[in-house]
Image: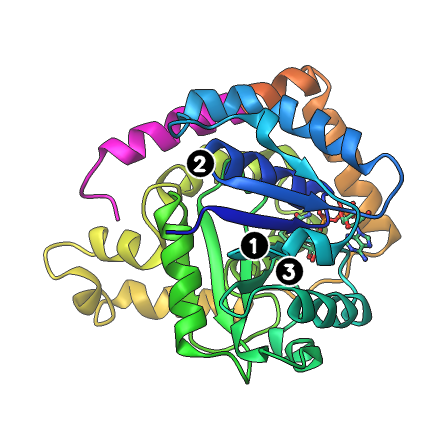
Amino acid sequence: MIRRVAIIGTGVIGASWASYFLARGLQVTATDPSPGAEAALRDAVAQHWPSMVTMGLAEGADSAGLRFVASPEEAVRDAEFVQENAPERVDLKRELFARMDAAAPAEAVLASSTSTIMVSQFQDACARHPERVVLGHPFNPPHLVPLVEVAGGAQTSVAAIEGALAFYRGIGKHPIHLKREIRGHVANRLQAALWQEAFNLVQAGVASVADIDAAIAHGPGLRWALLGPFLNLHLSGGAGGIGALFEKPLWAATEGMWRDLGTVHVDAALGAEVAAGVAQELAPHDRAEMVRQRDATLLALLKLKAQAAELP
Ligand SMILES: NC(=O)c1ccc[n+]([C@@H]2O[C@H](COP(=O)([O-])OP(=O)(O)OC[C@H]3O[C@@H](n4cnc5c(N)ncnc54)[C@H](O)[C@@H]3O)[C@@H](O)[C@H]2O)c1
């Protein structure tokens, strides 16, 4: 079982991973070259910790156990698993993976949080063990949201992918395996489809920004937090389920709608219209309290989901 984890880059995502790994009782060693990074990381972990306590700490979990070191080489020296969260630049990832590969124990898996770069674009910079480089893409914020997308690049071994899946699963994450690399992975592509149509509906003057938000948050979003698009279709397809649905006239109309979906560019006018709509939507609310209530409600939902054995 993996006990020693290194975090490379401690900005938004690295700090959030650090909190989660510490809460699971792992030994965490982190590094980040920016001035003040250690203090910022410790502040971020302190802010996340009450949520980690609510979620439930592993035995012996202690945020004070966090180590901060001066270089990636030192951070990975005795690591069993490495989570890289440096800025989204291919040249930087290439340099970092070359250094981490040179310094990490041969059996350590090297995972990248990258949202848009493919593993094949930087794993060949590793001279020793390119086969242990994987995608480990979290969904923000990783200390709260269980999804992690795991994929290999052209040189990744099956063992590294299985090792990453087992590691994430073992610490309470919900990893999925992408059988091949694709720009944006899976979850962000699904979100992109929704955002594209949300902006299109604003531009077409169909509904206000607030009503489009409500259409998700008070409608399908409630079920989508419990079951994904295919199971939701299956359960709403009557006794015959999803298979029978494709034979019904409603299905042809649904596919017809796909062909109507807009492709949209957010130009200055559309950007300003959406920003004004969001400001109007926020006006009666306290933003900090909104964030607090969102995260508290999310934690409560995660607890409820964990008790619902038939929700996958
Ligand atoms: N922000 C998101 O919503 C999100 C979600 C999932 C994945 N990601 C991915 O996570 C990674 C980090 O994104 P972020 O939003 O945390 O960015 P960020 O800018 O908040 O953090 C990046 C950190 O890397 C540090 N850094 C710079 N050079 C470095 C180096 N040579 N070695 C180590 N650290 C270095 C920076 O000082 C900074 O603290 C990116 O690959 C991004 O695609 C981001």
Q: What is the C-alpha distance between the residues marked 3 and 2?
A: 24 Å
Choose the circle earlier in sequence order: 1 or 2.
2
Residue 269 to residue 143: above or below: below
Residue 104 to residue 17: above or below: below
Mark whose residue sits in front, 3 or 2:
2
Kind of residue sitting beneath label 1: Ala
The residue under the point 62% across, 47% down is 206
The residue under the point 49% across, 21% down is 296
Q: Image quadrant of residue 112?
A: bottom right
Q: What is the C-alpha distance between the residues marked 1 and 3?
A: 23 Å
Whether residue 170 is visible: yes
Which of the labelled discs sits on residue 115, or is there none? 3
Q: Position of residue 294 (x, y in %)?
A: 54, 25
Q: Mark 2 sits on what residue?
A: 24
Q: Which residues are magenta?
A: 295-312
Task: Please tell me whether residue 22 belongs to the stretch shown in magenta.
Answer: no
For the stretch drawn in magenta, the main secondary structure is helix
The residue under the point 89% across, 39% down is 35
Q: Mark 1 sits on what residue?
A: 79
Tag 1 near tag 2, CB within 8 Å? no
Q: Position of residue 101 (x, y in %)?
A: 65, 70
Kind of residue sitting beneath label 3: Ser
Q: Secondary structure at mark 3?
A: loop
Q: Is residue 97 left or right of residue 138?
A: right
